[in-house]
Image (tube, rainbow, N blue to C red):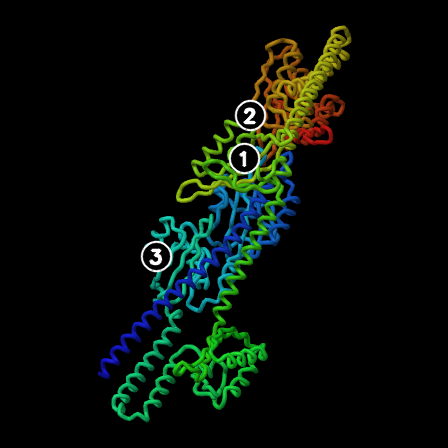
Amino acid sequence: MIWLVNLVFALVLGAMLWISHQQQLQHARERTENTSLTLERGLSGMLNQIDLLLLLTQDALENGMVGGQLDTQMVRRVINRAAPQIAGTVAVFFSDAQGQVAGNSGFPLQHAPLSIQDRDYFRQLRENPARGVVSSKPLIGRSSGKWAILFSRAYRNPGGNFAGVILVSVDLERFSGMFAALKLGERSRIAMIDQDFARIAAYPVPSDTSLLGKRMQQEAVIQQLQTGIESLTTTITTMIDGVERIYAFRKLESRPYWIMSALSVQDELQAWRHQLAFSLVFMLAFSAFSACAALLLQRGWRRQEESQVMLASTIEASDNGIMVTDAGRKLIHCNRNFLAMWRLPAAHGDEMAVLMQMRAQLRDSEAFLAGVEALHAARLSEEVATLYLQDGRIFERSSMPMLVADQPAGRVWSFRDITERKRAEEQLLASAAMLRESEHRFRDLVNSSDGIVWEADAQTFQFTFISDKAERLLGFPVGDWLVPGFWVSHLHPDDQSWAPAYCASCTGRLQAHDFEYRFIAQDGRTVWLHDIVAVVEEQGAPRWLRGLMIDITAHKQAEQDLQGLLKEKTALLLEVHHRVKNNLQVISSLLRLESSRSKEAPTKAVLQDMQSRVRSMALLHETIYRQGNFAAIDLGGYIGQIARESLKSLQLKPGAVQLRLDMSQVQVGLDQAAPAGMLISELVSNSLKHGFPDGHSGEICITLQPLPEPGHWCMQVTDSGIGLPVDFELRRQGSMGLQLAVDLANQMGGTLHIGAGPQVMMTVNFKAQVPAPIEITLGGERL
């Protein structure tokens, strides 16, 4: 019979242990899931702030471009206001379209230019500027030298083209610090996983940092996550350390990231193992007791003693600290957990003596003693209370009467350490408070933004949220925007068909987009809006549209005004050049008349030289008028035309002297083209006068070719005439034409060199001056 009792007891105890084991595992799973939920909310809040910072910087960059120039000071002020609000942000960068970092916040750039042209995220955004936020794999920053994750977004120039990339660098130590703050245990694991199921942040940080950014090895888990589920809890034994852990995966809301938390099953079942050990001891004690009870069943005087032993064993097997007193408040028994919890060497005597030792450790000892007295006064009452100790521990105290024949025969006091549970509750409450604060700050940022932040249904375009800025900018109350069809019905008539169709087309392709359209305000005004739209998908289909409307009415009006003024000024400058050319032609005609009337050969020659020089200047203004470009002249084409005109007008015997041109194209400014044209006219005139006298025939060759040194050119005039006279150097000093040629070469930024025969070779080596842009001021605005 005794063995049957032991078997039943063992089965009951085994069932209780199995239930306790399952409860402990369930508690571990819930703790793992709660940890992943807390991390998901914290990381989502931080990533939302980073995304908002990217949008603010993008808006500042795109609105900070005036006349093709970027107001970098204004952009840095925006970054410096927003970036310090995001804990863990190392720096904010922005680059130009070639990947050169043009500005930053957080630390100074190095002396060498910093380029991100080879980074994957830069190439992705350059190919698709509308892609939205792109994150990098973990990498070592080229300026900071630390491991970091970069979140990037493209921005555009006023023409809508890709202008560069905005970067927010987040130090991986920020993630590790956030994970370590949870203090989950030595063998716990926490990681942040991207859309490629690669770990981009982990705690503890692996000793081999090359593992960061590598894909997870649990393919079965990856296949489950790829089905579109939002969370997954499973148990996995890792091959690296052989530890069995409970893994909880949770997807970040509206983000392509997963948060993973893993708790060691062995650590979580530690308390259960203690319970198992105590239960085994208890079962062995019970077996021994039952055997003794069977042997001494007939001895009634030992029944009470055996009962007390069994009670003591039961109390000792409990995880709680238990103290039992009789009706006279004498101490009957207290287990070892009670002594350990209250750090007492021993406990004996009456209840009050023990209570006085406990009192010294409590924060509110008077309330504790008053509660004890109240319970003894109400002899059948039960109570559960929370005790706060001076060393920071928190106990849950429960007290109930011990009944014998339905009469109170004493009281049982049970104490349980709930410090960890309370701290976990406080952490959850703190996380919830942080989340509410984050939401409040986000709403404040939205309402303080210069644009209108909105959210709408992706299928019906019905607005579900719009910021207060809408009423201030367009006059309609927020409630009106939530009415179905409100947005479409208030578009400008010319935009009511194409704007919704374009938005619907991009939405159907899950493509982020932006477009400009006109909106009729409440007071009848037509307001130009630049709408930047992001598409939020659920299970592969568009679910929500979230965007930012920016008022660009003033910008549009300024564009129209500037275009009109620019056309007016361009026409005015063309008319000026046309009239100057006409006046110079009149002067040339007068000189030709005077030359034909003069009978003195020297005077006639001087008038012809002057006519040739005036003609070269007139030809320059005619070239500007015809091509409509005030800043640059094709030097090769211009001096070729000068040479042909000079040969045609100065050659006495048509066809006797041939002209050969070898010209390359080079753009120069007007200040360099004018003396070059006059110099060619002077040198051709010189060759015809002195190289081919009395109708001699031959050839004049003019070349314009680049020199090996970048930006340097050689202009050369040679003829096959009679060559230079023996006394050339003496004549040169008194020649006005050659002195003028030397001065003109100096004006070009070069030096005239005259080579020794047999052919006459005159060379000017010069550096081509980059054409300076023409600045036109209209009403205080520079074009």
Q: Give the mark nearer the N terminus: 1 vs 3.
A: 1
Per the image, label 1 sits on a secondary structure element best described as: loop
Q: Residue at x 71, y 23 (%)?
A: 738
Residue 448, picture quadrant: top right
- Label at residue 218: 3
Q: Give the mark nearer the N terminus: 2 vs 1.
A: 1
Per the image, label 3 sits on a secondary structure element best described as: loop
Q: Is residue 550 above or below residue 695?
A: below
Q: Which residue is mark 1?
A: 161
From the viewer's side, name the closer residue of 766 and 95.
95
Q: Are marks 2 and 3 in contact (CB under 8 Å)?
A: no
Q: Residue at x 68, y 31 (%)?
A: 749
Kind of residue at badge 2: Pro
- Provide residue 365's location: percent of width, then percent of height: 58, 79
Label 1 crowd bin: few (<14), some (14–19), many (20+), radius 10 Å? few
Q: CA distance from mark 2 to mark 1?
A: 27 Å
Per the image, label 2 sits on a secondary structure element best described as: loop
- Provide residue 131's location: percent of width, then percent of height: 48, 41
From the viewer's side, name the closer residue of 217 and 689.
217
- Provide residue 615's location: percent of width, then percent of height: 69, 16
